[in-house]
Image (cartoon, rainbow, N blue to C red):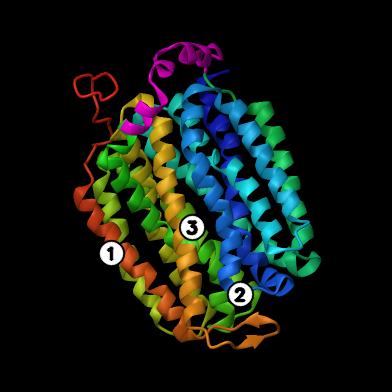
Amino acid sequence: MKKDNAWLICFIASLFFFYEFMQMSVFNAIGTQLLKDFSIRVTSLAGIAAAYSYSMVLFLLPAGILLDLFSPKKIIVMAFSLSVIGTFLFSFATTPLYAECCRMISGIGGAFAFLSCIKLATRWFPGNKMSLVIGLIITLAFLGGAVAQTPFTLLTQKIGWKDTLRILASCGILFISLILLFVKDNVDNNCSIKILAGKNNKTPFFKRVFVSLSNLQTWLGAIYIMLMNLPIVLLGTLWGDLYLTEVKNFTHIQASYIDTMLFVGIMIGSPLFGFISDKISRRKIPLAVGSFLTLSSSFLLFFHFTSVQAYIILFFLLGLFSSAQGVGYPSVVENNVVELSGTVSGIASIIIMGGGAFFKILYGWMLDKNWNGVMINKIPYYSHHDFNIAMTILPISFFLSLCSILFIRETFCQRVVNQENDPIKN
């Protein structure tokens, strides 16, 4: 297979990541119906949504290590299949506990999504293209998040949340078929065999983990990404619809348009920030600019606008500016030895996803804590004041992300670990 097909291979493999973002974001479309059908409050809804993240966090580290050792294509197919099975089983849920178990099954498979895409990209592209490639992979993933907004809202209103999830599972089967047909591990299939027989297997498991965890740059980069990802985690995948319909009095369809703009902003911003970062050979400048602009935009959430257009622009800007997080991924990888790229990415993802799950629960808890007990159509009603208190999470997080950049090491788009300071060999 020609090297020119690297883009096609990584694009097809990224359908796994695309699907997982549909998985995470579909709660904006089905969340209201779940509140009604299960007769639960938002904290319980957050628990169902976060169950996916909890199981993902548990399996991210094993996922990173397995991707360092075995064929990414085989792992993608197996993990993707598990995620689809979880989605299909979820469509039969009648209790919150059963729904959480199904989400955990999907989360185990989802743990491999982004890491497998990064692993394939590092095998098919040189380092000076990594930021752009990762930015485009993230763009495709967020397209999945956008698809899960208006189209899935319309589907849910027409056929209900259960059949909507079954359609989602069917899409997964189609994507797995494409991956089986087109994805290849290396330019030469024997490369994967050589890797397995090479130095990667000689590094003990616990040393991999220890070296990755002991690098402060891994923590700083991951925390930055996690904090900058909160607009998607809190508004794009769960609370955006409830916020816009209950507080701003928009319809569910209007809310889905607005939520979609978060993903559109990131879809444009991710390759843009990645291209700029690679062009100027700097990581910290795009990170800092993105943090500052996202922080500035977040204060507009506390103003009361009456038009849909105003929130479309606001959510687009939040997505566009927060997409600087994509530059954080190559920064984390470049601050570690190449042999540990999968393990380090796994640990970083644990921090990112674990933090996201925590903030989902915290946001729901803050809403319930100030709730006055009002119910409308069997759904809890939260006031503008309730949401404003919970929304303070965002500007505080963006300020902290700006502070973290002070301690992140500039890599100049190259690995900073060389033969002399390689922690694996020393």
Q: Say which amino acid is labelled 1.
A: Phe
Q: Quadrant of the N terminus?
A: top right
Query: Could you tell me what secondary structure mostly forms the magenta stretch?
Result: helix
| Residue marked by disc 2 | 41
Percent position of residue 86, x then y: 69, 47
Q: Say which amino acid is labelled 3.
A: Ala
How packed mark 2 is, by other alpha carbons closer than 10 Å (few <14, some 14-19, many 20 or more), is some
Q: Say which amino acid is labelled 2.
A: Arg
Q: Please indicate, yes or no, whether residue 319 appears anywhere in the rendered image.
A: no
**Above or below for 327 versus 196:** below
Q: Are marks 1 and 3 in contact (CB under 8 Å)?
A: no
Residue segment shown in magenta:
187-210
Left or right of residue 56, residue 19 in this image: right
The mark closer to the camera, 1 or 3, is 3
Image point 41% across, 37% down: which residue? 345
Q: Please indicate, yes or no, whether residue 391 appears anywhere in the rendered image.
A: yes
| Residue marked by disc 1 | 399
Image point 53% across, 52% down: which residue? 53
Percent position of residue 396, x then y: 32, 68
Query: What is the secondary structure assignment of the residue under circle 2?
Result: loop
Query: What is the secondary structure assignment of the residue under circle 1?
Result: helix
Q: Quadrant of residue 377?
A: bottom right
Percent position of residue 378, x then y: 70, 82
The answer to which of 100 and 166 lies nearer the viewer is: 100
- For marks 1 and 2, the one nearer the N-term is 2
Q: Which mark is residue 309?
A: none
| Residue marked by disc 3 | 357
Tell me if residue 220 is in the magenta stretch: no
